[in-house]
Image (cartoon, helix red, strand yellow):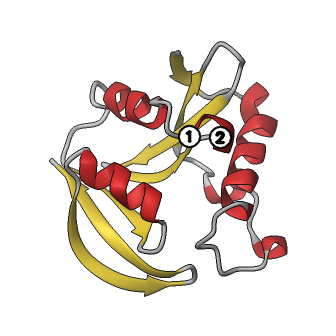
């Protein structure tokens, strides 16, 4: 799996991964037609992609030690791509890191807890309750 900075040629794949991850999320409470465009929600941020042998593009987005988006294509979730992106990010973004994770996104919460992320606080947003997590 190669990890590199995203380019304009990745835009369609990034949008599709974002769309699939949101519409297939069992925790999603917003109607799918209200989900914003990935380019709009990621404007001006650094985006890293991991490309596997089948050319799946995966994204992690970082800004000021805050990971804004970490999406893995549903077909390859649980195969180490998220972990690989976070490992790669350590060379480019100083810890501690923070991110928000929807509380009812049990798979993601288990993933972060397994990697040593700690819950700082619980809040409520447009997707329901979420945790602010920290990794040191």
x then y, percent, for residue 81: 49, 31
Q: CA distance from mark 2 to mark 1?
A: 6 Å
Q: Residue shown at 57%/38% (left/top)?
A: 59
The reply to whether callout 2 and callout 1 are in contact (CB within 8 Å) is yes
Q: Which mark is residue 69?
A: none
Q: Residue shown at 56%/40% (left/top)?
A: 77
Determine the residue located farthest toward the left in the rendered image: 136
Nearer-the-camera pick, 60 or 7: 60
Q: Quadrant of residue 85?
A: top left
- Assign a secondary structure to mark 2: loop
**Disc 2 crowd, CA 10 A, few/some/many (<14, 14-19, 20+):** many
Nearer-the-camera pick, 92 or 31: 31
Left or right of residue 76: residue 32: right
Q: Quadrant of residue 25?
A: bottom right
Q: Which residue is mark 1?
A: 77
Instruction: Let me know if residue 64 appears in the view.
Output: no
Nearer-the-camera pick, 85 or 81: 81
Q: Residue shown at 28%/30% (left/top)?
A: 90
Q: Which residue is mark 2?
A: 73
Above-or-below relation of 109 to 47: below
Left or right of residue 13: residue 53: left
């Amino acid at each position: 799996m190669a990890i590199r900075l995203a380019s304009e040629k990745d835009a369609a794949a990034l949008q599709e991964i974002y769309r699939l991850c949101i519409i297939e999320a069992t925790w999603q409470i917003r109607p799918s037609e209200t989900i914003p465009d990935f380019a709009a929600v990621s404007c001006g941020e650094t985006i890293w992609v991991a490309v596997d042998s089948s050319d799946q593009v995966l994204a992690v987005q970082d800004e000021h030690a805050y990971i804004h988006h970490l999406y893995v294509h549903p077909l390859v979730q649980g195969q180490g791509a998220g972990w690989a992106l976070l490992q790669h990010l350590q060379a480019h973004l100083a810890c501690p890191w923070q991110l928000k994770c929807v509380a009812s996104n049990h798979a993601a919460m288990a993933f972060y807890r397994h990697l040593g992320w700690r819950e700082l606080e619980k809040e409520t947003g447009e997707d329901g309750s979420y945790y602010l997590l920290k990794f040191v």
